[in-house]
Image (cartoon, grey):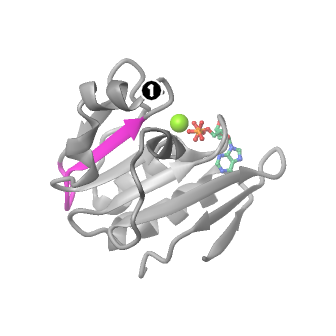
Amino acid sequence: MPIFISHGPAETESLGETWGQAAQRGWVIAMSGELGAGKTQLVKGVARGLGITARVHSPTFTLVNEYDGGRWRLFHLDLYRLETRAQMLSAGLEEFLQPDGVAVIEWAEKLEHGGWKLEPGKVKKVKVELIGETERRIIYDDFGA
Ligand SMILES: Nc1ncnc2c1ncn2[C@@H]1O[C@H](COP(=O)(O)OP(=O)(O)O)[C@@H](O)[C@H]1O
Ligand SMILES: [Mg+2]
């Protein structure tokens, strides 16, 4: 898997932007990594790469934020507050695992707690690791970008 070392938020966003530029309908970008790692920063880049101009902020009280106006609709999910499969199902998660557009999921490691297997192909796994105040190690499936 490719590894990218980022030295600041702008570099992280630029990496996400390349993914947004390459994204195809049905892609699910499954992100894991601790709080403050830079997952949302990557999503900002994905949005920009799709041509979305709206400001991206994490969904906090809802499961998903949707953004139109780009090449594909972007669904931005954050599973931080969900623990069980039942909670995920009642929040309506399943629809976004085969999105009519591109889905980016923060705290995707929780999907496995819920019993979902992330199959390679349309699901792209991303892991963001904090290695310093402004340094991050981003390990990701090949996006064909
Ligand atoms: N190289 C970097 N990449 C991404 N974010 C960084 C980096 N260096 C510092 N930061 C800061 O870390 C924080 C990452 O926040 P965020 O993207 O919301 O994380 P997460 O969604 O993983 O909780 C932001 O405040 C950002 O400015
Ligand atoms: Mg976040």
Check the picture and name the quadrant holding the C terminus.
bottom left
Looking at the image, which residue is at 28% across and 26% down? 91
Q: Secondary structure at mark 1?
A: loop
Check the picture and name the quadrant holding the N terminus.
bottom right
Q: Nearer the viewer, residue 108 or 83?
A: 83
* Image location (x, y in percent) of residue 24: 25, 69
* Image location (x, y in percent) of residue 49: 36, 62
* Image location (x, y in percent) of residue 126: 54, 59
In magenta stretch: residue 88: no
Which residue appears farthest toward the bottom when viewing the image? 144
* Image location (x, y in percent) of residue 122: 32, 68
In magenta stretch: residue 74: yes
Q: Amino acid at mark 1?
A: Leu
Q: Nearer the viewer, residue 75 or 1?
A: 1
- Range drawn in magenta: 69-78
Q: Is residue 3 visible?
A: yes
Q: Is residue 102 left or right of residue 68?
A: right
Q: Nearer the viewer, residue 67 or 128?
A: 128
Q: Is residue 32 left or right of residue 64?
A: right
> Pointer 1: what residue?
82
Where 102 sits versus 36, above or below?
below
